Amino acid sequence: MDSWKTLAIAVMVLNSATALAAENNNPFQAALMITTIVPAVIISGVTAATSSIPDLFKSAKGDALAFVGSNGEIRGAEFEQASRYYRATYSQPLMSDQQLALAIATSF
């Protein structure tokens, strides 16, 4: 008699699991998820990837200030490393060294 009760409970559990899985087959819910959640995830991922600042730019602030203050005569090691990273990362650099130094000094 106990085996019948166990079998009945197992069948009820399997039926309820199937019913729960079938709730996600609504095409409206799938379309809503694709049009609202997926773009938000993509945008937040891209924003997080592009807003991360290399630490070498943060550590080059002092050297960038010296570069700007000396009108380009003092090139510290950390600013030089940041400048080389910038030139290697962007195939067509958008800023001169003076502009890069000003950007580092004011932003970080």
Image (spheres, rainbow, N blue to C red):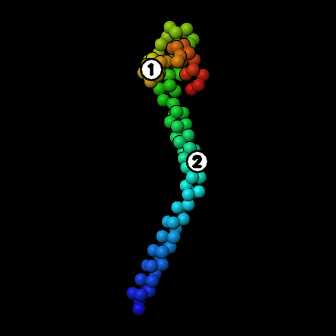
Residue 64 visible to an observer of this rendering: no
The single residue placed furthest to the bottom in the displayed view is: 1
Residue at coordinates 54% horizontally, 33% vertically from top-left? Answer: 51
Residue that numbered label 2 is attached to: 35
Q: What residue type is labelled 2?
A: Thr
Residue at coordinates 57% horizontally, 11% vertically from top-left? Answer: 69
Q: Position of residue 83 (x, y in %)?
A: 47, 18
Give the class, few, some or many, for how many residues have Cα within 10 Å of label 1's Cα (few <14, many ≥20): few
Q: How many labels does the image show?
A: 2
Q: How far apart are marks 1 and 2 (CA)?
A: 35 Å
Residue that numbered label 1 is attached to: 91
> Dividing the picture into quarters, in which one does residue 84 lie?
top left
Residue 52 is marked as: none
Give the class, few, some or many, for how many residues have Cα within 10 Å of label 2's Cα (few <14, many ≥20): few
Q: Where is residue 23 in the image (x, y as percent from the top left)?
A: 54, 65
Q: What element carries label 2?
A: helix
